[in-house]
Image (tube, helix red, strand yellow):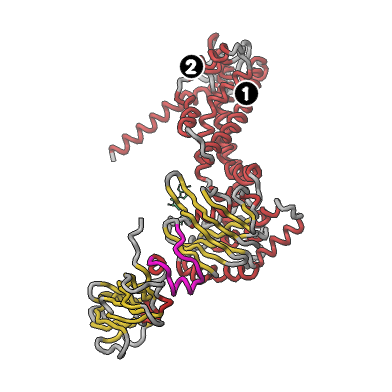
Amino acid sequence: MRAWNLIKIYTVLVYIFMFAPVAVVLLLAFNSSQFGGFPIEGFSLRWFAKLFENEAIMRAFETSLILGVLTAFFATTLGILASLALVRYKVPGKEWITTLLISPVLVPETVLAVGLLIFLRWLSMPRSFAVLLLGHTMIALPFVVLVVQARLVGIRKEYEEAARSLGANPLQTFFQVTLPLLMPAVFAGALFAFTISFDNITATIFWRPAGSETVPTQIFGMLRNSVSPEINALGFVMIVITVGVPLMAGGLARYFARKR
Amino acid sequence: MAQVELRGVTKSFGAFLAVKTVDIDFQEGSFTTLLGPSGCGKTTILRMIAGLEKPTGGDILIGGRRVNDVPVHKRNLGIVFQNYALFPHKTIGENIAFGLKYRGVSRADAAKKVSDALDIVRLPGVEDRYPTQLSGGQQQRIALARAIVIEPDVLLLDEPLSALDANLREELRVELKTIQHRIGVTSVFVTHDQSEALAMSDRIVVMSAGRVQQQGEPEEVYNAPATEFVASFLGAANLIEATVASADGADVVVDTRHFGRFAVPKKAANGLGPGARGKVVARAEKLKLYPAASAPEGGVSAPGTVEATDYQGQIVRYFVRVGDIQLQSVGMIDGSPFQEGTEIAVGIRPDECVVLPAEEPSE
Ligand SMILES: Nc1ncnc2c1ncn2[C@@H]1O[C@H](COP(=O)(O)OP(=O)(O)O)[C@@H](O)[C@H]1O
Ligand SMILES: [Mg+2]
């Protein structure tokens, strides 16, 4: 009994340790005080209002959203193709290709970032939005591949074979049968890719073109001056997006699954 | 409808030979079963006919045309899989209409064909349901409907009944045969279940380890097995060692250690000459047991002991010891069955026996 209680207390402490900083940000975002700290003086939405008036932040937001959506699109498309090739076709050196695809997860991001920059310098390409997109896609791809591959392995080949036997060519079979069955994983992979891109800071600092900011680099820049309460409001918005979007998507998916 | 021919077809997976030089003719409109134990290459042959595997050697002809290089979706075949393989994200109606889409059938015609197909498999009106809302047996009927609605040249069935429970299996096998007979489509059926094969087939191809052991009508394969494998795979057979004593006249006389000397019809002796060693095949249901010392006069019999009985309702199976061999006998229960340990006489009917040549140990 005593041991159980200890474990319970310990668990609660771990959770407090993990979520207290998040809670602090969430709370302070609504603090009316000038200074981003406790005690909380009163409830106010003024920091949110200021946030929306701040053009630099809004521009960073736009960049982050576009970058996230495009990263999700490219990483998912490439991830599906790579998974199909690796799971459904006989590819020589399959294990090596898989390892190579997954490796961006294992390599420290700083190394990856510097590596890509050196490579681009060698090609004498300047830093640009396209480079940033390429880099984010590279970082997100392994997650998409892992999720999609796991699902594809679970889809029996017979579905595709039945479609082929009924007269569908390989492309028709993919769009009529494989892709719809793969959809939950594609969806999850795309969300993963979006959040990974939206959250990324280390590599982004290396890759972003001069004068262009994403939300994380913008926050980072602002922090160098002072901890403005605006940042707490921005933090709140980011948490809502990175936690809320997947939750909402999951809810929608379940809703449509039930309607069926 | 078309005839399917396999000519010297082989298939290897890496260094492993799964199918070894197989020649089979599937007659137009016939129901042919590939029968054999698990792993003998039945599915591989079916998949090669379908175009889902490429033969390593030999030719496959459908309707007289060589199809080795024709891709699956251009072969016009219906396939029914063991696990139904209905598209889970499509309704029953969409599942059945799937193949019609690629054949330029108009929407209205497709709806009519789908509902006709559902009538044929006796599941009318389920168009709007999803596969998971149907039972296993119903799903397999839908899979059959989806395969036949496109009017395929050949219908390929890979153990379609194996995933169902016993009662349903027997019900569906009768129905499947009836439907096949009605639409007259050339059908290739794969099973490891000999009773399914015997009940449904026009022809049976018995396979073992990638080779065809025997092909013929069910009665032929059952009553006149060509190899020891066929004899023991279909039903229970007793193999009794024998040597041919003489082979002149209408009969062939064989010598056995356990049943002495007796004559079998010449056509049952597979051309064995005097001195040849072989085995007499006596099916379990042809082996008669009598109380000791009351075997009929002039019959071929040997004394034995009942070692074990396997009571199956109306039928009983006896395991009988005769000298150094154990024989099986299956019969309807008629009066009171023999108890274990009873001394009995075992009788065989020579005119119902087949003699097979002794086999070299296979590789
Ligand atoms: N794609 C494959 N790769 C390697 N071996 C295979 C493949 N498909 C089948 N085999 C092997 O070929 C043999 C025959 O298989 P199969 O045709 O499925 O047998 P059956 O249907 O009679 O049970 C088996 O030993 C199986 O392991
Ligand atoms: Mg099989």
Q: Magenta segment: does it hold B184?
A: no
Residue B248 picture quarter: bottom left
- Badge 1 crowding class, 10 Å Cα cut-off, few under 14, some 14 to 19, many 20 or more, is many
The amino acid at mark 2 is Thr
From the viewer's side, name the closer residue of B103 and A209: B103
Confirm if mark 1 falls within 8 A of ligand 1. Answer: no
Extreme-top residue of the structure = A225
Q: Position of residue A247 (x, y in %)?
A: 56, 36
Question: Distance between the Cα atoms at labels 2 and 1?
Answer: 20 Å
Residue drawn at x 47%, y 26% as measured from the top left:
A103
Which residue is labeled 2 in the image?
A: A110
Q: Secondary structure at mark 2?
A: helix
Q: Nearer the viewer, residue B301 or B268?
A: B268
Q: Position of residue B232 (x, y in %)?
A: 38, 68
**Residue assigned mark 1:** A67
Q: Which of the pair A210/B358 is nearer the observer?
A: B358
Seen in the picture, residue B195 relative to A36 is either above or below; the reply is: below
Chain under label 2?
Answer: A
> Magenta residues, as a range?
B211-228
Give x and y (percent) for residue B15.
42, 45
